[in-house]
Image (cartoon, coloured by chain):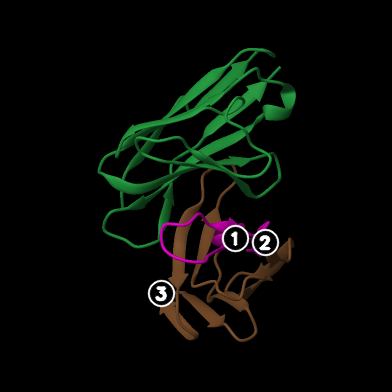
Chain colours: A green, B brown
Amino acid sequence: SAVISQKPSRDICQRGTSLTIQCQVDSQVTMMFWYRQQPGQSLTLIATANQGSEATYESGFVIDKFPISRPNLTFSTLTVSNMSPEDSSIYLCSVVGTGTTDTQYFGPGTRLTVL
Amino acid sequence: QKEVEQNSGPLSVPEGAIASLNCTYSDRVSQSFFWYRQYSGKSPELIMSIYSNGDKEDGRFTAQLNKASQYVSLLIRDSQPSDSATYLCAVTVQGNTPLVFGKGTRLSVIA
């Protein structure tokens, strides 16, 4: 499976600011996704990061709040904009490798706390 | 709307016993089924995938799939305290589409 890293691993931010989370994979992957896991909850898909085009957002998530970039097949960023305490969550990227059809692997996550 | 249902638990089993975790899904065209284990504060770790009706065994883990009943289960034999975690059932319709997760079942193995 691909080795996935995320930066930062955790951060504490002030209300109204923005944070960009990076996801780096050690090999080219076909699909990259961003998930959110709120405290005590399961995973919720934010969007599919599309290489070279705009991300595909799930219901309830919008580009202005969660802009996503994917400039190539190994890297993506998620920005959490104009943060509020309700954005405090773990943010996870996941990938589907080029050698597999649908198995998704997760990065270590970014734990975000908004004060 | 696609849904994946799991009993949230906690499910408590004694060390050495069989833990049985269950999952149902709503979308009949689902094709791929996964079990992830998530320790507190960590990201989900894939432990099993299953695509065809029947059983699939990997070490102490057995996944069972019944598409007619839209039911997936995970059996953990000889449960160990290190198996204590939240187990997430995930389903996808086809390759390269995002997973739909259940809320997870918290398993506690008592020594």
Residue mark closest to the camera, 2 vs 3: 2
Q: Say if mark 2 contacts mark 1, CB within 8 Å.
A: yes
- Along the viewing direction, whichever of B13 and B107 lies nearer the viewer: B107
Q: Nearer the viewer, mark 3 or mark 1?
A: 1
Number of numbered markers: 3
Which stretch appears magenta?
B82-111
- Which residue appears at 45% of the width and 69% of the height? B49
Neighbours of disc 3 within 10 Å: few (<14), some (14-19), many (20+): few
Q: Which residue is mark 3?
A: B59
Crowd band around label 1 with a 10 angstrom C-alpha radius: few (<14), some (14–19), many (20+): many
Which type of secondary structure does the marked residue at label 3 adopt? loop
Check disc 1 and give the amino acid type. Answer: Tyr
What is the x, y in percent for residue A45?
A: 58, 46
**Which residue is disc 2 drawn over?**
B105
Q: Secondary structure at mark 2?
A: strand
Q: Chain of mark 3?
A: B
Tell me which amino acid carries mark 3: Gly
